[in-house]
Image (cartoon, rainbow, N blue to C red):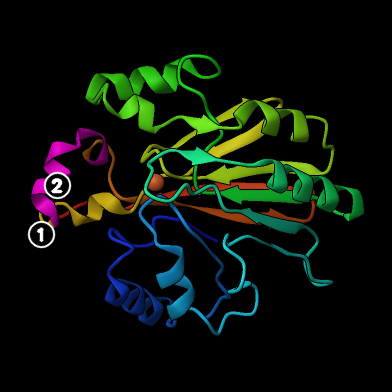
Amino acid sequence: MVTGDLVQDGLQIEAYEYLHTLLGCLEAPYYLIPGNHDNRSALKQVFHETTYMDTAAERIEYIIDTPKLPFALLALDTVVSGEFYGQLSEEQFQRIHEVSCTLYKPLVIFMHHPPLTPGTIDPHIFEYFKRFSPALLDGLKFIGAEAFANQVSGLSSLRAILSGHLHLSAQLLWQGIPLIIAPSVAPSLKGVIPYKEHLARIGMILQENPGLAVHLWDSNINNLVSLFKYYKLPT
Ligand SMILES: [Fe+2]
């Protein structure tokens, strides 16, 4: 699962073409969801051959549920065009409800934005951001977090919600559900022109080494094992 912000500027179609080439080297199947840096049209255009994406639908969201998989993956599209923050709508809550009613195996949800709300649910995480850039706080909000919480908090099949966006590796119990926030690969762009100046303005991107989370399914415990991998930047 590649959980969004697949490219820096979603309007540059060649960025998706480059990503397409890179991901084409993988032996494992991969699944994409958009983040706030992405452009859905460009993404769909370049990855039009994928079978899991409904290119006619506006949002890029889907469920992966095959007989071989002991669990199901629900990818939710939390992007609000032109905005930094995330959102889930009534229509998506309905979909979650339908999926949960018909599913007889564990479920893992993927979404780019974690469903956090500054200052209410998770003061520690947002204090962290305030130190770097108070202006970012508004952009980190999530519209619909409370309704989403009502929708999923009683779901016994839901094993975890996996997200990114914050450029910060963290895990917490959100509404009793493990919420795992993966680190970002963006710091690997440090020192790369033309991103150097852009990154220098946003201290939070440089706080961690580039990294990612790899989630393995362990059938013995019928649950996820999440590994965090970090890469050292050249000095
Ligand atoms: Fe993001």
Element type where label 2 sits in the image:
helix
> Marks 1 and 2: in contact by CB < 8 Å?
yes
Magenta stretch: dominant secondary structure: helix
Residue 63 image position (x, y, % from top left): 72, 62
Q: Is residue 204 magenta?
A: yes
Q: Quadrant of the N terminus?
A: bottom right
> Gap in Å between the C-alphas at discs 2 and 1?
8 Å
Give the residue at x 79% y 52%.
220
Within 8 Å of ligand 1, the CB of disc 2? no
Q: Residue at image x 70%, y 50%? A: 108
Q: Which residues are magenta?
A: 195-205
| Left or right: where 74 falls relative to 200 | right
Mark 1 neighbour density, 10 Å: few (under 14) some (14–19) many (20 or more) = few
| Residue closer to the observer: 170 or 36 | 36
Q: Is residue 235 visible?
A: no
Q: Is residue 18 left or right of residue 120?
A: left
Q: Is residue 135 visible?
A: yes
**Is residue 163 rendered to the left or right of residue 147?**
left
Q: Position of residue 36 (x, y in %)?
A: 40, 50
Q: Residue at x 14, y 38 (%)?
A: 201
In the displayed structure, 146 sits above or below 70; it is above
Relative height, residue 83 to residue 203 (above, below): below
Residue lying farthest to the bottom in this orientation: 49
Write the residue at 70% across / 41% down.
90
Q: Which residue is mark 2?
A: 198
Q: Is residue 223 above or below residue 7?
A: above
- Horizontally, is 95 left or right of 167 in the view? right
Query: Mark 1 = which residue?
Result: 194
